[in-house]
Image (cartoon, rainbow, N blue to C red):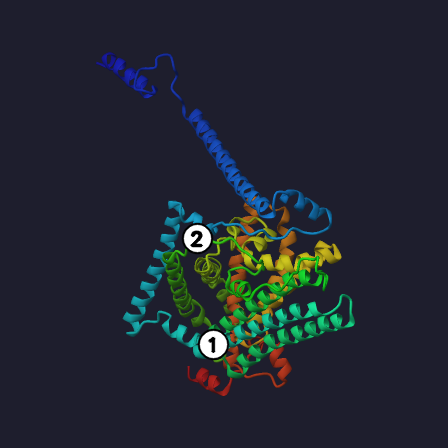
Amino acid sequence: MVNEDVPKVRLRHEKMNSVDGSPTKGLAPLDAEKMDKLQDRMQEMRKTVVEDLDAMMSEVRELKLAASGMQSSGANGTEDNRTTRRNGKLQDKVFVARNSYLTDLFEISHFRTIYNIFIVMLMILFLNTAVHDFIETGTTHVGIGTIIRSFGNFSTTILIWILMTISTFVTYLGFSMWAHKREEFSPKSFKLKAWDYLFLIAHAAQQLAFITIPAKFLIDIQHPPASSLLILMEQVRMLMKTYAFVRSTAPRILVQKAKDEDNKRVVCPGFSKFLYFLFAPTLVYRDEYPRTKEIKWKVVLTNFVEVLLVVFYVAFMFERFIIPPFDKFGSKILEPHAVVLTIFSLMLPGLIMFLFGFYTVLHTWQNCMAELLRFSDRLFYKDWWNCTSYDAYYRTWNIIVHDWLYAYIYKDVYETLHNKVIATFTVFLVSAAFHEYILAFTFQFFYPVMMLMFGGFGMLFVFITKNYSKMDGNIFIWFGLFAGNGILFSLYSMEYYARGHCLPYEDPLFDLLLPRSWACRPSELNASAAAVS
């Protein structure tokens, strides 16, 4: 019996070692060690192919942009760029028609599935909280109350925005009058110089008033935080737009020779160009931009609905994770260990809201405005999530602001002083000051945590992470985002509620500059509430 079964076993073994099921006599079966080596080799080959494919795609994208830039610059685009660098000048931004990164990535089913999973996770979190609150208390807290309180007095917000827009139009009218009036004066005349300096002083005074008046008004009326944030972000946007327009157009007017009939006249751009630039999703001025042929209203509606949903979810996250640890600050003093635990507990919610802010401001809203205005250059950010250094992260996560800082701050400082370190430091200083200005007047207290983390540690990390490997650098970036957002949300929330529950310092200057959360003195109402509890 045993001898009869041996040929059958050998035959089955030969079939297992054949490709098409036919016996492969003379071939030894693959042992486990050889199979492991083969699998390891296949994994290495797969990794190499993926890396090569990624490099090829990046190279194709760069070549496409370079080709578009050459076409935009004319036949001698490459030579012009080379001459520009030789003369100590930096290259200017070239606008080309292109999609946002996430727009292209969402066309891939794998990335679209990740998007769908994220949506389902938020739905489950929302339902879990709503059902729990309804069963325990009979009511639900789903963010609506927070939205109403944060965006309170919204009619005043709209009125302030309209007045700021009118002020921006006045700036254009003043600039246009200056440009046309100076044609009446002789070159190098005293009247021409006096007219130029008069416009410069008037423009600086108008911009100073544009900054101070809305900020003071927000403090006087105690405007809600979200409404204040909208006004301040729009104020900074209009300020940057105005500076970009004047900075880009004024040199062309100043270099022309007045009363020279043979010279082609350079006049102020028309109001329609300024108006389009004022609302276009870019901060770098050009007379013309690449445009799409038509408006896709479905894209506009989809992006607008996503903006509303994100606002709703951010309010929900605040009610669920941010407000509970701090809403009783002042009546209940937080011990240092409790503060540390709170910071760690807010790292994940803080990062989620950071991603919400990125997706809403830099992807959804910008694409919505771009579609409405048929603005076809939609590279508002790059793949910052793959960055391995803070230098690359700062240059890729917000292309809109980065382009403005590069074109009007870094470029001017570098071409004047020819020092990259000073130019970089100036960019960080200006950016940190703008961020801190918005936060200070939104919450109506000065607490320079953002300035310290962005202008201090952020700039330091630029030099630290330059030589990191790809994996280590990317891990460090994401760890910094987790920890940084946890610290920011914790400290600013703590100080915000301390301002409402703790007594102010006797010296008004100290009360402005020193955080109340560091040495909270509970008010009588909060002290009695603490005694009762």
Question: From the viewer's perspective, is the residue at label 2 or at label 1 nearer?
Answer: 2
Residue 342 falls left or right of residue 77: left
Task: Give the spatial CA distance, label 2 vs label 1.
Answer: 34 Å
Residue drawn where x is 58% and y is 79% of the image: 213
* The one of 227 and 10 positioned closer to us in this rendering: 227
Outermost residue on the front side: it is 261
Residue 194 falls left or right of residue 484: right
Residue drawn where x is 44% and y is 30% of the image: 39
Local SS, label 2:
loop
Q: Earlier in the sequence, mark 2 or mark 1?
A: 1
- Kindly identify which residue carries mark 1: 157
- Kindly identify which residue carries mark 2: 293
Residue 413 falls left or right of residue 491: right
Is 190 located above or below residue 426 in the figure?
below
- In which quadrant of the rendered image does the N terminus lie? top left
Label at residue 288: none
* The one of 44 and 85 positioned closer to us in this rendering: 85
Q: Mark 2 is on which residue type?
A: Lys
The reply to whether callout 2 and callout 1 are in contact (CB within 8 Å) is no
